[in-house]
Image: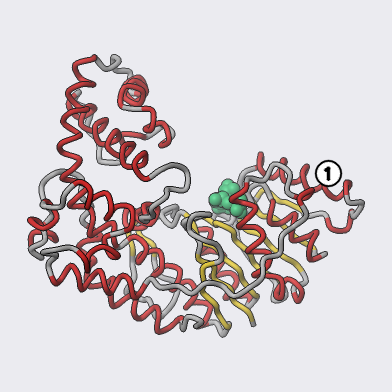
Amino acid sequence: MPLDVPSALDDALRALLPVHDILDGRVDDVDPPAWCVDRGWVDFLLGLGDDELARCEAGGLAERAPDLDGAPASLVALAAAVTTSTQIPVLDAARHAPPASALRSVRERKREQLAALLGAVAPMAARAARIVDVGAGEGHFTRLAAELFDREALGIERSAVSVASATARAASRAHEIDAPGSVARFVAYDACREELRFARDDLAVGLHACGEVGDRLITAAADARCEVALVSCCLQKIAGSVRAPLSRAAARLALRTDTLGLTNLTAQPVGVETTIEATIAARQVRFALLQLLRARGVVLDPGEEMRGINRRRARKGLRDVATMALALRDLPAPTDAEIAHHTEASRRLYGVIRRLSLPRSMLARLVEVAVVLDRAAALVESGARVTVATFVERAVTPRNIVILADR
Ligand SMILES: C[S@@+](CC[C@H](N)C(=O)[O-])C[C@H]1O[C@@H](n2cnc3c(N)ncnc32)[C@H](O)[C@@H]1O
């Protein structure tokens, strides 16, 4: 059944707003946060065995809570509310797979997303005078939309390097198929710092448009009353420290960047880039790094320990990232004793943090859904007919919810 945006948003807000204290109380050390103590959840969470903890992290506490012996009733009730409010229907649209020759050097998972999104927008693309792809990246969607729908297509992208490679790729493809008319154009343009404006007969598209770019796209599309296809991504990438809601219906939904960042941690049994075990091991390494840096007298907030270091690097282990993090601060390399001490301490302490973090992590998909529904509601309020659905499996991309607005 299609999702009714206003009532789905209402459900999501009813589940989310009363647990704002949980969202605001990230667990960064072993002291149980007030939200956990006050609700009487500490003993239950700390009593979870290692296997059950791993299952909760892989499948999500919302799914596991009803089957867990001794789970507090208030936790089970919250789990049920999360489960209900995060049910998103699967999009009912045929894929529109481009020819293999148009997809050279496009990764498999991106191919899946492109085929699904091209299929989803096909009716709107057929009516549009122009397709505008915001945050176009390497320009795959823009290029393919121009070719498959025989439409003018413009890719807006902040990175001049990506614009250059997208332009070259589109030109080479147009030459290959001998169809210069279907060449996509790309402009280097910052859609957040410069004005973003659509025409009434544009189709505005964002495929994994980062945080603020997605909000800008929705606002500009609502102003122009044009049609929209948006897949949201990296909600925490916003200029300020708090995201203001776009819709009147979600007027009370102000979310901090660290809460928005939670949405990148959504539980799923098979990690997209790697296994869940490797992801958790990498988080433990980051925790150990934080402790090591603090023990060296470096003053820093959780999350800052990896500043200047690619987050994937944590998979290489504590010695590797500690050497880099200390060098970045002009400090001597870690000793064997430091590595051994912080590896062992983090193994013990991080088990506590993992357990105490389960309720907050359970809210990740709910926050994502609430932001998507706020965007969708802003389009509904502008008079559009809006569909919110998953357009690919979560194993293809965890950010798999599309907003389609037609007029
Ligand atoms: C996650 S990538 C998605 C790229 C592409 N749409 C895809 O799906 O492969 C987001 C893109 O948005 C671009 N971007 C981020 N902020 C932007 C802004 N303010 N204006 C224009 N592009 C931006 C980034 O450079 C990046 O290429």
Quadrant location of residue 384? Answer: bottom right
Q: Position of residue 163 (x, y in %)?
A: 69, 45
- The C terminus lies in which quarter of the figure? bottom right
Name the residue: 15% across, 71% down: 74
Q: Which residue is mark 1?
A: 172
Q: Position of residue 82 (x, y in %)?
A: 30, 70
Is residue 160 or residue 368 the one in the foreground? 368
Residue type at numbered disc 1? Ser
Q: Position of residue 63 (x, y in %)?
A: 30, 65
Name the residue: 24% across, 32% down: 288
Depicted 165 relative to depicted 248: above or below: above
Q: Position of residue 255 (x, y in %)?
A: 33, 63
Depicted 155 relative to depicted 337: above or below: below
Depicted 57 relative to depicted 340: above or below: below
Tally of numbered discs: 1
Is 197 placed left or right of 282 in the picture? right
Name the residue: 28% across, 74% down: 81
Is residue 388 or residue 111 the one in the foreground? 111
Tag 1 secondary structure: helix
Depicted 156 relative to depicted 344: above or below: below
Is 74 placed left or right of 229 in the picture? left
Quadrant location of residue 114? Answer: bottom right
